[in-house]
Amino acid sequence: MTTMAVRGHGSGQLAGTAALLRLALRRDRVMIPVWSVALGALVASGAGTLEKVYRTAAERADVAHSMNGNGSLRALYGPVFDDSIGGLAAWRFGGFGYVLAAVMSLLIVVRHTREEEETGRQELLSSAMVGRRAPLTSALSAAFVANALVALIITSGLAKSTGDTAGSAALGLTTGAVGMLFAGMAAITAQLTESARLAKGLTGAVLGAAFLLKAAGDTATRDASSVLDWLSPLGWAENVRPYAGERWWALLLIVAAALAQGAAAYVLAGRRDIGMSFVPPRPGPAEGRISTAYGLARRLQRGGLIGWTLGFALAGLLFGGMTDGAADLVGDNAQTKEIIQRMGGQSGITDAFLATMAGMLGMLAALYATSSVLRLHSEETGARAEPVLAASVSRVRWAAGHLVMAFGGAALIMVVGGLGLAAGYGREPGPILGAALVQLPAIWALAGLAVLLFGAFPKLAQAALGAVGLCLALGWIGPALNLPQAVLDVSPFGHLPKLPGPEMAWTPVVLLTVVAAVLVGAGLGALRRRDIAG
Amino acid sequence: MTKAITVAGLHKSFGRTHALDGLDLAVEAGEVHGFLGPNGAGKSTTIRVLLGLLRADSGAAQLLGRDPWANAVELHRHVAYVPGDVTLWRNLSGGEVIDLYGRLRGGRLDRSRRHDLIERFELDPTKKGRTYSKGNRQKVALVAAFASDVDVLILDEPTSGLDPLMEEVFQSCVEEERDRGRTVLLSSHILSEVESLCDRVSIIRRGRTVETGSLAELRHLTRTSVTAELAGPPNGLAQLPGVYDVALHEIEGSQGHRVKLQVDTDKLDAVLRSLTESGVRSLISTPPTLEELFLRHYTGAEEEAVTR
C-alpha cells in the first residue's frame, strides 16, 4: 500500500486569503460602499454645512465658547478645540463618525468570521485550499478596505473645503483607525463566543461603554483630559485634536491598540477548533418546560434583554451623576440657549440636560426594540419559524411572542434607565421617570415600522434599522445644523414633549401611540396573508 | 376509503420560477404514501402549501378535508411535520425542543413513547442546538413527530443524515404509525425505504405529477427485458405492439437463434406466444428494477431541463 503525500507549500496559514477577500467584497458589494460613502460624505460635507450656519469668525468663536461651557453638549459631542471651520466640523461630526465607523467595522468582521462558522459555510470553505488564518485575515482586510475608503473620503473632502490638509488627514485617519480598532475588538469577541449575534452584542457593549466613559470624562473636564477619557478609545480619538495642533501620538495609540487586538484575535483563533469557542457548551435539561410560542420568544430574547437592562441601568446612573456638574458650567449665550431649547427644552439647564439624556436613552431603546422585532425575520430566514408555524401556532401568536419582548422590553429598559437617571441625580424620581417613559410612543412607532416592513416587505426588513439610525443622526447632529423643521420632524422623537421641564403634551404622545398600533396591525395583517420563507 | 390529502391542479410561482404547475396528489387515510421526484421538482413546495405556509396561486389543496391555508392552526393539531433540514436554536437542548413541539401541537406528547423513542434513536436529549450533528438534529424532529398524537405525519426527506441502523429504526417507527391507522406522506430519495414502506407512490417532475399508483402498478407500466434462445427463427417479433430494441443472433453450429428485446410489461403475453411458436430452449425475463423505474422519470426531467 502506498501513502499519498502532499507536498507542503511553506506555512500555508494564509493560503486562500485573496480568494476569501474577493468573496467578502463581492458579498458586501452593496453594504461596504453604502456605509463608507454615506459615513464619509456625512463627515466630509460637515465643513460646508457649518459654514452656512456660522458665517463669521465671531459667530464661530461664540459658539465654540458657549459649547465648551455646557456639560451636556460636551458629553454628546466632546469639547471644541478650535473655532476654525475645520475645528467645528471635527467637533460636530467627528464623534458621530467614530461611532459609525466602529459599528460598520464590527458588522463586517463578525459577518465574515463567526457568522460564517455559525452557518456552517466556513467549514466548506476551510476544506478547500484555505489556511487557518485566512478567514480572519480576509475579514480584517475587508474592514480595512471599508475604513480606508472612509478615511480617504473624509480627508479629501475636508481638505478641499477647509484648506487644512493636516487637520483633515488627522480626522480622516482617526475615523478609519477607530473603525479598525473596533474591527480588532470584533475579531476577538468572534473568537470568544459561538454566536454571531452575541459577538456583535458584546462589541456593541464595549462601544457603548467607551462612549459613556468619554461622555462622563468630557462632562468632568473642558479639554478631554480626564482619566475617564483616557480609559476610552473614543476619548483617545478626541485627543488627536484635528485642526487644533494635531497630536499624532494619540492616533498612534489607536493604531497600536488596533494592531494589538488583531494580534490577540489571531492567537485566540489559532487555539480553537472551527465552529467552537473557548467556553464548552454545557448540557441542557433533558425535558423542557417551554410550552407556548411566547415562552419560546421569551427564552430566545431573555439574554439580550438582560444585557440591555444592565446597560441602561449603568448609563442612567452615570448620566444622572453628571447632571449637577453639567448645570454648573452653563454659558450665558443666545446660541447655546437656542440649541439647548431644540434638544431639551428651555426650562432650566438641568431639566434640559435630563431631557437630552432621556432622549438619548429613548433612541437607544428604539435600537433595542427594532432589533428585537427583527428577531422574527432571522427566525424566519433561519428556517426556525417554519416548524413552529407547522405546529398549532398561528402566525399572529408566533409574532406576538416576540413583539411582547420588543415592546414590553423597551418599556422595561426605559423604566430602568429612568430610575437610574433619578438615582444618579439623587432627586425625586417621578418627573425623571416621566421623561423616560414619554419616549415610549416614539420607540414603539419605530418598532412598529419594523413590524410593518417584516410583515409586508420582508426583504426590506433590515431597513428598519436604517430608519432608527436616521433618527439617531437627526437627534444627535440635527439640532445645531439649522435643518428645516420638516426634516427634523421625520424623527418621531422630535415630536415628544421635552420632559421633565415643560408641561406634558398629550397630543403627540397619543398620536404616536396610535401610529405604532396601526403599523403593528398592518404588519401583522400582511404577515397573515403572505408566504413564509423556508 | 376517505382521502387524507387531496391536491388538484395546484399552481405556485416564485417570481419567474413555476414551482408547481398543475400538481395532483391523493393520499388515502391510513396509507404510507411515497412522494418522489428529482431535486427541485416541487415536493417541498407542495408540502409547504399543505401546511398552510404558502398560499397556492390556483388549484385546490385539502388536508383532512379542509383548506390548510384557512384552517392552519386547527389542522396542525392533527399533523406532525419533519423538515428535510432541521435547524435548532443554539441555546435550547434537544429535549426542550421535543417537548416544545409536542406542546405547540396541542400538548399531547405521549411520555412513555417519547422516552422509548429517545432510547431507540439513541439520542442524547441534553445536548444543545449546534452541538448536534445533522443526523441527530433530524432525530430530534423525528422523536417529536412520532411521540405526538396526530393523524397525519408529513415527512420531507426525514432520513437524510441517518445512519443505516437509525434508518431501520425509522422504518419500524413508520410501520408502527401505519399499524395505528395514521397517514404518512413520505418524501424520499431512498428507494429501499420507499419500497419497504410505501403502499402507493406519486412521482412528480417539474411541478407536475407524472405517475401515481402502487409500486406493482408502476412496475407494470414499464418494460421487461427478455432474453431467449429459440430452436428456430423468430416470427414477426418486431412487428408486435409494445416491443422495442429487438436484437437477433444466430447461434453458431446449430439452427438456434438468440433474441434480446424490451417489451412493455402489459404486452408480455403476446411476445411469449410468439416466442413459443419458434420453440423456446431457454428464457430469461427480468422485471424492471425500482431504480430503472425512477431513473426513467428522473433522467427524463434532466433532459428536459437541458433542452430548455
Image (spheres, helix red, strand yellow):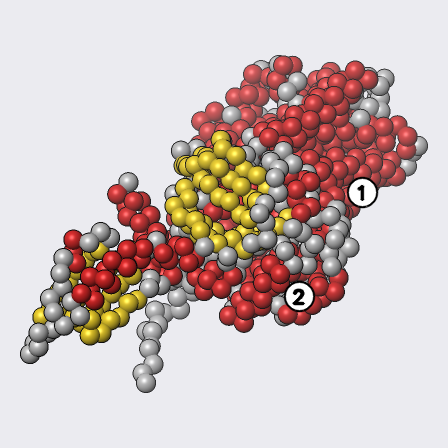
Quadrant (top left, top right, bottom left, bottom right) of the C terminus of chain A = top right
Q: Callout 1 environment at 10 Å: few (<14), some (14 to 19), or many (20+)?
A: many
The total number of labels drawn is 2
What residue sits 53% from the left and 41% below the top? B6
Relative placement, left or right, of A26 versus A344 is left
Give SS at disc 2. Answer: helix
The chain letter under disc 2 is B
Marked residue chain, label 1? A
Residue ID at (55%, 21%): A49
Circle 2: residue type: Leu
Residue B276: x and y in percent read 21, 67
Which label was assigned to residue A313? 1
Residue type at mark 1 is Ala
Quarter occupied by the N terminus of chain A = bottom left
Q: Is residue A524 above or below residue A20?
A: above
Numbered label attached to residue B239: none
Residue at 71% x, 66% y is: B115
Helix, strand or loop for disc 1: helix
Numbered label attached to residue B117: 2
Q: Quadrant of residue A489?
A: top right
Measured in 3D between alpha carbons, the distance from the residue under mark 1 to the one under mark 2, in whole angstroms, is: 47 Å
Q: Is residue B69 left or right of residue A358?
A: left
Nearer to me, A346 or B278 = B278
Along the line of sight, which residue is nearer the eye, A528 or A130? A528
Q: Give x and y (percent) for residue A171.
A: 53, 36
Q: Which residue appears farthest toward the right when viewing the image? A: A428
Residue B257 at what x, y percent from top left? 12, 70
Whether residue B255 can be seen here: yes
